[in-house]
Amino acid sequence: MTERQYVEGKKPDREIPADKIGRLELPTEQDAKSRTPGDEASGRTSPFWVKCWSCHQYLTRPLSPPSEQAYTCPNCGAVNQI
Ligand SMILES: [Zn+2]
């Protein structure tokens, strides 16, 4: 159960209004390596992972399942639609 769950970001095929674009976060070094099962038990929220279509970095979105929304990658600035 070490596999990380993520969705792959897509390049949006349409214009997305700026106010509809959220922000993804770069994971911390520790998160990038592996998360321990104790993370959630200790009150940390489980991040939701997105793989940037442009730079292929794994990024996190705090909380909750994916919705049809766009997010800006903080690493390369590309907009990911998920
Ligand atoms: Zn990126």
Image (spheres, helix red, strand yellow):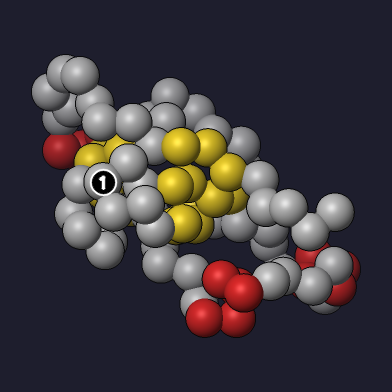
* Lateral position of residue 45 relative to residue 16, left or right: right
| 72 lies above or below 32 | above
| Whether residue 81 can be seen here | no
Q: Is mark 1 within 8 Å of ligand 1?
A: yes
Residue of label 1: 54
Name the residue: 58% across, 49% down.
48
Name the residue: 48% across, 69% down.
27
* Lateral position of residue 22 relative to residue 30, left or right: left
The percent position of residue 80, horizontal first and vertical second, equals 31, 38
Q: Secondary structure at mark 1?
A: loop
The percent position of residue 39, horizontal first and vertical second, equals 78, 71
Name the residue: 26% across, 46% down.
54
Closer-to-camera residue (53/23):
53
The percent position of residue 12, horizontal first and vertical second, equals 24, 26
Name the residue at the top extreme. Answer: 14
The percent position of residue 56, horizontal first and vertical second, equals 37, 52
Closer-to-camera residue (12/54):
54
Closer-to-camera residue (60/63):
60
| Whether residue 49 can be seen here | yes
Name the residue: 47% across, 46% down.
50
| 75 lies above or below 61 | below
